[in-house]
Amino acid sequence: MAQQFLYRDYVETLSKRFEANVSYIQYFYGFDAGREFEIAICKTLRAALPQRFGVCRGHVVNMKRGQAGDDIIIYDKFLFPTLRLLPEDDFSLKEWIPIEAVYAYIEAKHTLNLEQVADDDGKQSTIGHAMKQLSDVKKLCGTREQMPLERITRRFAMPKGSVGHDDPSLPSFTNPMFGMILSRYVRCGKDENLKPKAIQKMFVDYPYKNECHPDLIVAGSSNLVRPVIPGKAKNDPNQPKWFFEGGCKLQSLVTKEVSFGVGLAILLTALDYIQLGTLPWPAIVNDAIYPG
């Protein structure tokens, strides 16, 4: 008997729709470059996410023109404008998104190369480059003002110390950024026929050297990598975690053809947790009125 999932096979349905949507776009447009695959992922996310979340390709930027990333950004489109003001859902051009507006950043790779040595052109391998890009985005977004747990809305806050987490492993603020790597296929060097168990072992052995590691890696249709708390049982129902900057390990899992659905469900869970602050409007206005 086939495995059945909650809510009438919600996770399996998400996985199948992801695959079907990406295959449909590839049939008509092809994936000759990373740009086309990123656009396909943007269109897939746009169909899956609630309307309050904006989706674009581009860079995150702070007030002082610091920038990071160049892939997919999920941001608050109801409260924050993009900086280039492009037509809605035009994914062909890249946007600039203020760090205060960023919910999540996704490094999208059509094929994720797990080889750890440099490519022939001297660049980092695909997995190394993706990890570095994501780490840089998380570091930059980590400089934004943290919204305390007591901040119930943008206009109302409870007394300091009156609100806490039942789970102490969660961050002590409400606006962390979620970072993930998403790939359709996986290879190691020229080997494109890797089995899920082999992929799992490669991630177990991978040296995670970046300052900020991913909150999730979707590595093809049957592999996930997620943060876990050392010492907790792997089958603990409270084990899946994210928003970690340290104090945890990364666990490699085989997910039997549903990793895209599980990944999207985890992304939706993280988005449901995040409560963003606001842009520093007084500083923006005063900078324009009193330049220099």
Image (cartoon, rainbow, N blue to C red):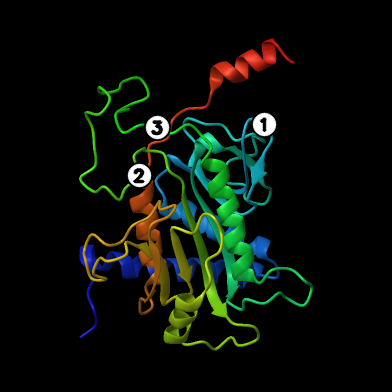
Instruction: Give the quadrant of the N terminus.
Output: bottom left
Q: Quadrant of residue 29?
A: bottom right
Indicate which disc, 3 or 2, sits on the residue closer to the N terminus.
Answer: 3
Q: Residue at x 36, y 79 (%)?
A: 256
x and y, in percent, of residue 19 in the image? 47, 71
Q: How many marks?
A: 3
Secondary structure beneath label 3: loop
The answer for how far apart the CA atoms under marks 3 and 1 are is 21 Å
Mark 3 vs 1, N-terminal side: 1
Q: Residue at x 59, y 69 (%)?
A: 127
Rendered-image quadrant of the C terminus: top right
As rendered, which of 232 and 64 lies closer to the eye? 232
Q: Amino acid at mark 2?
A: Pro
Which residue position is annotated with label 3? 147
Q: Residues within 10 Å of mark 3 (few under 14, many from 20)?
A: many
Mark 1, Cα crowd under 10 Å, few <14 / some 14-19 / many 20+, is: few
Up/down of 268 relative to 187, above or below: above
Please give left or right for residue 246 compared with residue 35 in the image: left
Residue kind at label 1, given as amino acid type: Lys
Mark 3 and mark 2: span between their CA atoms?
A: 11 Å
Nearer the N terminus, badge 1 or badge 2? 1
Q: Is residue 63 visible?
A: yes
- The label number, if any, that marks residue 171 in the structure image: 2
Residue bearing mark 1: 64
Q: Kindly identify the residue that appears in the image at 56 percent across and 64 percent down.
A: 209
Q: Is residue 109 left or right of residue 226?
A: right
